Image (cartoon, rainbow, N blue to C red):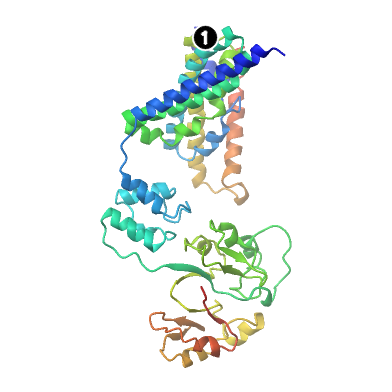
Amino acid sequence: MEYILIIIGAVLVNNFVLVKFLGICPFLGVSKSTENSLGMGFAVIFVMSLASLITFIIYHAVLVPLDLIYLKTIVFILVIASLVQIVEMAIKKFSPSLYAALGVYLPLITTNCAVLGVALLNVDGGVALPIDNVLKAFINGAASGVGFTVAIVLLSAIRERLARADVPVCFRGFPITLVAASIMAMAFAAFSGMIS
Amino acid sequence: MDITAVLSASLLLLALGALFSALIGFLSTKFTVERDSRLDEIESLLSGANCGTCGYAGCQAFAEAVYQGKAKVTDCPSTSPNNKRRINEIMGINESVGEKTYAIVHCNGGNACRDKYDYQGYGDCRTAEMLAGGRKKCYTGCIGLATCVDKCPYFAIEVGENGYAEVKRPSCTSCGLCISNCPKSIIGRIRASARVYCACSNHNKGKEVRDVCPKGCIACGVCAKVCPEGAITMVDNLPLFDYDKCTACMLCVEKCPTKVIKEIKD
């Protein structure tokens, strides 16, 4: 039950993009077509789950015993950046087709604040439910990535329609996209309070 | 201050950094993907402007397209012919790459051209163009608000004190961004070997041109008459040069009454 609550909480209630407003840059930058945003979404799921797994382990195995909790931000950045690099190299070697699909987006996520955010919130207890073991951290990371994917795919579908709509000149491009994103955020705000 | 805390913190970061860099270094040798060295060579021979005129995302993407045979090197306007020839050699393609060209501004009105209104405030040529077709009375007069200057990735065009845009030859690669962004469409390409050009784009008759700009071409046709090679024809009230015939005798430059035909000096 707890795991299901974590998943629902991360995907809908505390959606990273639309409720916490993290990772807005790729959310607006890569949402022009559904195909690309799906690629980005899967890359984010991938990196977020791996990052929350590794950072959780490092936090509890290294930082807490050494009493260096205040270093968590810089350590997590280091870990995530190296991790993405390694993963990128591995994908390039073993699955060129996956690399071609994710390739552009993987380096983009290296310093994404949503990835750092999920790692920090996992250990800070900033999530609605206490994250007290590695599996929960991993699930929370993956579900947060799914939440990001849901948000970006929805927005890309809206933007594909907007591209054909007769938008007033002053609203064309990013202004109308931001309006759409804010309405989406209001819709997601309806979930707030479901899990306290 | 507790020195051990400082030491342990920096040692931890050092250790983590060393660990990860060693890991990445090791894995990068292990996971290297063989890349055809020709691809790197092609990329290094391209102009590197990432101007996007070829229709690809950048010079790297274009290099890959050339390598895969999806694109021709001539699709890139900004790489020099020498480098294009070398890329064709690398790829084993036997094709002409064309003569080097430069961008050129067909207007020398600027401050001399009369104003329709006084334009103050924010904007560039394109916004000025929306306001009754720009501030100049001449419908092809250079507005001088430097849209081309903003667009040029090489800083190869500038609006001088005369008030019209001029191309600086050494830096220009003929990528065409100024050409496609000029709202007046008065920038064009010209062969590097061409020695004369007409610095006016106004197709109106002499009197109408004279009314708006003292420097414009009045379509008198003297240049066409004096040219010993017959390289100039008057088309729609402007001289048209046939550079295959031109011998750079400069007679047209001398005889032009408004001095709108100019010699090109490198």
Q: Position of residue B109 (x, y in %)?
A: 63, 76
Q: How many marks?
A: 1
Q: Label 1: how many residues lie within 10 Å, few (<14), some (14-19) or many (20+)?
A: few
Q: Position of residue B42 (x, y in %)?
A: 36, 51
| Amino acid, disc 1 | Ala
Residue A173 seen anywhere in this rendered image of the structure: yes
* Residue at figure coordinates x 52%, y 70% from the top left: B104
Residue A118 seen anywhere in this rendered image of the structure: no
- Please, is residue B248 above or below residue A82 in the view? below
Q: Is residue A41 left or right of residue B181?
A: left
Q: Quadrant of residue A111?
A: top right
Q: Quadrant of residue B134?
A: bottom right
Looking at this view, is A149 or B52 the one in front? B52
Q: Quadrant of residue A94?
A: top left
Q: Circle 1 sits on which residue?
A: A61
Looking at this view, is B262 or A40 the one in front? B262
* Residue at figure coordinates x 50%, y 45% from the top left: A163
Q: Is residue A96 left or right of residue B231?
A: left
Quadrant location of the N terminus of chain B?
A: top right
**Callout 1: helix, strand or loop?**
helix
Looking at this view, is B3 or B247 the one in front? B3
Q: Position of residue B9 (x, y in %)?
A: 61, 16
Q: Position of residue B14 (x, y in %)?
A: 54, 21
* Residue at figure coordinates x 48%, y 92% from the top left: B226
- Please, is residue A164 above or below residue B204 in the view? above
Chain on which label 1 sits: A
